[in-house]
Structure formats: C-alpha cells, structure tokens
Amino acid sequence: MAFLSERSRFVYNALLEEDGIADRMMNKGVRVVKLNRGDPAVYFKTPKYVIDAYVKALRESKTYYSKAQGSAELVHAVQKRYRSMYHVDFPDDGIIATAGLSEALLFINSALINKGDGAIIFKPYYNQYMTQLKLEGGIPIMADYEESRNWAMNPDVIKGKLAKLKLDRRLNRIKYMLITNPNNPTGTVLGRGVLEEVVGIANDYGVMLISDEIYDEIVYNGARFTSLAKLAKGMPHVILNGMSKDYDSTGFRIGFAIIPENDKNSDALKSKLVDYARVRLSLNTPAMYAAAEAIGNMKEHKKAIVHMTAEIEKRVNHSMKILKSNNFVKTVVPNGAFYILPRIDLKALRMKDDREFAQKLLLEEGIQVTRGSGFGAESHFRIVSLAPKGILDYSINKINNFCIRHAKR
C-alpha cells in the first residue's frame, strides 16, 4: 500500500519543474535567464511607501495574530479601491483575505467540490486552477479561449457545452465557471460584451462565476478592462485579486476573495471561507498593514502602477517585435499582464512536444521558459517579459537562433 495519499499525485507546478536543472547549471557557472516566473518584484522594486508601511507595522509591534479573515484596515482598503475604481460596494463580511490567490483557490475548491463535481475551466489556464480542483476530486470541464479569435471565448460554444453536460450522468453538479481577465498565460483582455454574455450564461445555468482579476491594472496597447464586479450584480460570483501583481508585492502573499452577494449559496461560501481562514489562524499581520497602506494610498499607487505598466508595455511589445522574425513560432499580441504564449512549429523543429522544446532550450541556450502544456496549451511555451530590454534582447534572440539551428538539423 502506498504511503502517500492518492490525491497527492495532483500536487505539481509546471512553472518550476525545470528549476533543478537550472540551479545545477548556474552552480557550474552557466548563465541562465529565467523567463518562467511572473514575479514583477524581481525587476521593479516594491514602492517605497509600501515598504515604509511594512517597517512601520514592525516597529509598532504589529506582529501578533490578526483577525482570521483579514484585518479591518485591509478590508476597508479593498472596499475603498473597488468603490473608487469600479463604483461597486462590498459588505465587510464579503471580503476574505488569503495567503495569495493560491490559498483562495484552495479554500474555494475545498469548500465547494465533492468527488465527481465539475467546474468549467477555460484553457489556456493558470496551472494551479487544475491542481486545486483535482485535489478535491473535481472534474475539469474544459472550454477554450480560441487562439484564432485572439484568445477570446465564444459564448455559443459555452452554451452548447453546458447543454450537453446536463445529460452527462458522470457529473454530480457543476459548481463554478472560472475565468481569468487579464489572462495568464495569454495576456488577453476580455471585452465587456463577451463578459456580459458569460455572465448571462452562468446566470441561466445557475453556475457560480469566479473571476481571477489579479492583473486588472496591468492593461495596455489600448485595451480596456472591465471587472466582473460591475456586471454580475444579483447573481452568485467571486472576485479574486491581491497584492502580488498590481502592487508589485509577490512575496507579501496577500490576496483576497470577494463574495459580494447575499443569496443562500454566496452566504454559505462566505461563512465556510471564514472557517478555513480560522483553521490557519492568521495571515502575516505586518504584511496586511502594508497592504492596507498600499491599496489605500491611491495617489502613490497611481504613480507606481502607471510607471510599471508603461514599462511592461514597452518590454512586451519589444519582445514581440523580436519574435516576429522567427518563422517557427506564431504569437497573439498580449494586451495585459506580462506574458507571451507563442505556438511552436514542432514538426519543423523535429521535436515531439513543448516539454522537449523547453528542456532543450534551457540545456542548450540557458533560457528557462515554461511549456505551454502546463497551462493546457500544447505546442506552446510561455515567456515572462518583465526583464529589462537588454536581457529580453539576449534571451529572445537565443530562442530565435535555437529554432533556426534545430530547423536545419
């Protein structure tokens, strides 16, 4: 009999799977450029006013257990942000702070999913969506962001899939539909019209809608972001957000799940998420005070996010310009977040899959990317375009030359 649990086999993170190889290469003095992890704090310093707030909390000895579901200061800062940015109001009990969105996903899936329950996941997806769902015995119902539509979604396809699922006796119940906007790993920003149709579909079929909006202020190239909070009033929904990306504070591990409505299902989920928060006692208390300051000080945040987004736009577009000369990849232009997801001509490169591509690129060129199949996008790979232009020049030219060399073999 196996010592480990059966469900532990689902615990896996494709983003970090090549780290062991990369570390061994670097220990031997080989230069490795890591374009696999979306961590803005590596390349953009967390704003000084946020660091000062963290230090102030420490000096004031705010190092005790905080309220399990989040400090009052943080909850009020989140309320203020959404009221100012999106003209929506959330009740105090509708905001549960979590250790990043990974913990929010863990709580939600554990609270909602019984073995055999389904959840609609759009691919490409952030890889932890699948991990957390399968850990609870959930069944992923795959829908697609369509590459031919610039990674947008087709509402008619979603309706057809839901109609067929009503007849599928393998499923106990469809518990939620999860979207990501802006998208990781594609960088797509969904338009308001598409979102309105998705809200209508979820409402018609009685499915809770979850929207991961962690990149909601990192939008560029003329795209416009619409929060689901503005469109889903009156129906059960959850908004996921946090400090990691917009506030350049990945290591703080502060996220939040917002459940605005007061219907029976929403109230049950809110109450149970608080129970989960109480089990782990508290988040990092000084980090929550710093987060409250980061979110509440809109003047300083505005300066920081405008600068960071403008620089990310330059870096993403610069990367795209270099990639366009590569005849062996095809890429949809991103308009949000900081990812590029090229499709690889594996046949021309004589490679069996995107895993082989990513491994050989690391071993031969010292460039670490993530295989697209880790996001449900076979024959793709993901580039994180946060590094300065000089590093991106070096890295993407390496990728291009790698493709040319393998195509000639």
Image: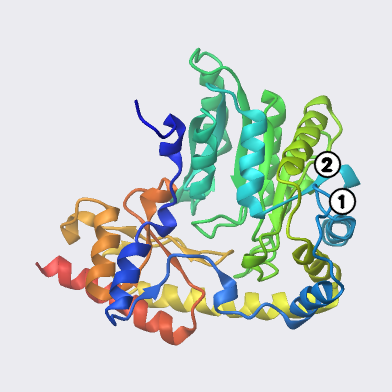
The residue that mark 1 highlights is 88
Q: Position of residue 308 (x, y in %)?
A: 64, 77
Residue 230 visible from this viewpoint: yes
Please identify the quarter of the rendering in which residue 155 is found.
top right
**Of 162 and 9, the residue lying toward us:** 9
**Residue under the point 52% across and 65% down:** 38
Q: Amino acid at mark 1?
A: Val
**Of 404 and 154, the residue lying toward us:** 404
Q: Position of residue 15 (x, y in %)?
A: 43, 57
The residue that mark 2 highlights is 260
Check residue 288 in the rendering and tell me which mark sits there, or answer none: none
Image height of 153 relative to 2, above or below: below
> Disc 1 vs disc 2: Cβ atoms closer than 8 Å?
yes
**Residue under the point 60% across and 50% down:** 102
Image height of 164 relative to 112, above or below: above
Image height of 171 relative to 43, above or below: above
**Residue under the point 9% across and 67% down:** 409
Q: Secondary structure at mark 2?
A: loop
**Residue under the point 83% across and 34% down:** 234
Q: Amino acid at mark 2?
A: Pro
- Direction from residue 197 to residue 136 in the image, left or right: left
